[in-house]
């Protein structure tokens, strides 16, 4: 997504980068599933999620401007808590969601392609084709999707807003007959708040992906916080409006049982003609997300390898194109492993989404802890932006997110599925992390190191 340091990214480009992850297909489906599972309670859940995400956005904005040349998101935790938490933050918050969240995006893309292009191909063909395509493009250094990321983000954002507005305008193509099981009437049965918090949280994750661009912004002190907070508000309004119209066009059972409920919703709003245009839009959004994660997370791992925090193999770059080939192959393999692990089953979408969301939330908890510690450890460090009401707001956010994690399963039967798979992955990462820091890096697990480029020294 980089446009080069000479170009100077403006506020609208930073805004588009901030919302780039949130406008993927997975968010559209998660909103529908949240409405189907939570009913009226999902609106309350979204309000809670908004406040927790606002705290995360503010924390990342403050730390990014404190350390504008830091190599990756792990630098914040490294300066505050040491190498073990720093490494675990990246693997919990960015590698694990690639293993659980991106497979959902591939399953959705596979469902769209099977609906629109009924070609008899093996089960995993389309996911493999999509991932390999963007792996090759990234290795070659091709920046095609980076150049249209701004336009893509705005197009999908406008689409969400327009779909919601048309859904309530009275001019939609095929709304469901009015009754107690449709529309507002359907929201009153089997309501839930707590159980849908983690599901809804996924939709607002990823706004911090803009922070690595801080060094390329024209006026980062002013524009970065505005882009992140403005992006959160825009996504919240668009997704809320989009979600509110779901049950006027798709029954609750259908939303939960379909791999492409968002396609049925859009066709209900605009009519059958919208099938192919929406499929194209959805696939581009999925492709953009896959492309961004391969590029972004691979470079995080490459930067960590330079600091000795991960295997040296991740430092290897293509001799001609200079791209981190091994890191890109590793990241690209994660969603394919997740697809095979789930069997490509649309019924796995809900549990995979929640597992990915929980992993990301745990990383956000660590980021909030890092902010509180940095405030105390480096009180005189330059802070162009300061999170308000600290440390009260961060501490409340930590408590709130831990509550979400504890109550993350939307249904009791999903709890063992989510925790067994997520727990096993995080345990492996934590054990390897602990061994690596102690015996390879030969450092203390919680020995903080202030990265180069941080402003000031603190007290």
Image (tube, grey):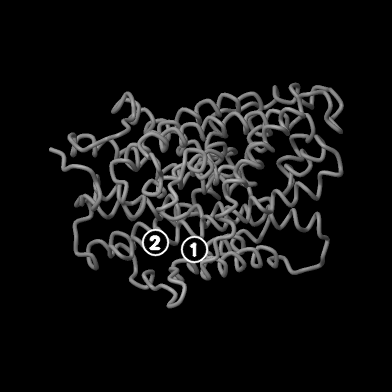
**Quadrant that contains the C terminus:** top left
- The residue beneath circle 2 is 301
Q: Which mark is residue 331?
A: 1
Q: Please, what secondary structure does the residue beneath circle 1 have?
A: helix
Q: Position of residue 244 (x, y in %)?
A: 68, 28
| Location of residue 437 in the rendering, given as x and y in whole percent from the top left corner | 25, 61
Mark 1 Cα-neighbour bin, 10 Å: few <14, some 14–19, many ≥20: many
Q: State left or right for residue 112 relative to residue 7.
A: right
Q: Residues within 10 Å of mark 2 (few under 14, many from 20)?
A: many
In the drawing, does residue 188 fall left or right of residue 146? right
Determine whether the residue tagged by mark 2 lies in a helix, strand or loop.
helix
Residue 29 in which image quadrant: top right
Q: Residue at x 64, y 23 (%)?
A: 40
Q: Position of residue 238 (x, y in %)?
A: 62, 32
Using residue 328 as the reference point, say whether residue 109 is left or right of it. right
The vertical placement of 425 against 61, above or below, is: below
Q: CA distance from mark 2 to mark 1?
A: 9 Å
């Amino acid at each position: 997504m980089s446009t080069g340091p000479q170009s100077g990214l403006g506020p609208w480009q930073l805004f588009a980068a901030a919302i780039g992850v949130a406008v993927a297909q997975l968010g559209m489906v998660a909103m529908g599933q949240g409405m189907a599972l939570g009913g009226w309670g999902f609106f309350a859940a979204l309000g809670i999620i908004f406040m927790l995400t606002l705290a995360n956005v503010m924390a990342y904005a403050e730390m990014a401007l404190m350390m504008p040349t830091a190599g990756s998101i792990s630098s914040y935790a490294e300066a505050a808590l040491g190498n073990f938490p720093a490494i675990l933050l990246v693997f919990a918050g960015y590698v694990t969601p690639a293993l659980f969240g991106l497979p959902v995006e591939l399953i959705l893309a596979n469902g769209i392609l099977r609906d629109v292009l009924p070609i008899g191909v093996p089960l995993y063909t389309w996911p493999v084709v999509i991932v390999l395509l963007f792996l090759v493009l990234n290795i070659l250094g091709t920046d095609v999707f980076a150049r249209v990321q701004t336009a893509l983000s705005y197009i999908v954002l406008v689409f969400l807003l327009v779909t919601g507005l048309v859904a309530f305008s009275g001019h939609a193509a095929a709304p469901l007959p009015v009754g107690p099981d449709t529309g507002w009437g359907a929201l009153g049965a089997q309501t839930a708040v707590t159980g849908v918090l983690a599901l809804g949280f996924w939709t607002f994750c990823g706004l911090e992906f803009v922070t690595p661009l801080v060094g390329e912004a024209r006026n980062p002190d002013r524009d970065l916080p505005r882009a992140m907070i403005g992006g959160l508000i825009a996504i919240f309004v668009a997704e809320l409006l989009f979600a509110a119209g779901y049950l006027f066009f798709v029954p609750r059972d259908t939303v939960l049982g379909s791999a492409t409920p968002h396609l049925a919703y859009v066709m209900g709003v605009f009519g059958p003609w919208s099938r192919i245009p929406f499929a194209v839009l959805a696939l581009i959004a999925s492709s953009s997300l896959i492309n961004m994660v391969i590029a972004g997370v691979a470079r995080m791992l490459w930067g960590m390898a330079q600091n000795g925090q991960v295997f040296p193999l991740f430092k290897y770059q293509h001799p001609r194109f200079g791209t981190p080939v091994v890191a890109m192959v590793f990241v690209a393999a994660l969603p394919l492993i997740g697809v095979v692990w789930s069997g490509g089953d649309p019924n796995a979408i809900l549990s995979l989404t929640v597992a990915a969301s929980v992993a990301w939330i745990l990383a956000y908890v660590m980021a909030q802890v890092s902010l509180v510690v940095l405030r105390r450890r480096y009180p005189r460090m330059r802070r162009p932006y300061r999170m308000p009401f600290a440390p009260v707001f961060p501490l409340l956010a930590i408590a709130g997110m831990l509550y979400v994690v504890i109550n993350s399963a939307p249904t009791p039967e999903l709890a063992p599925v989510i925790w067994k798979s997520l727990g096993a992955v995080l345990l492996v990462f934590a054990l390897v992390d602990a061994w690596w820091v102690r015996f390879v890096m030969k450092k203390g697990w919680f020995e903080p190191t202030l990265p180069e480029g941080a402003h000031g020294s603190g007290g």
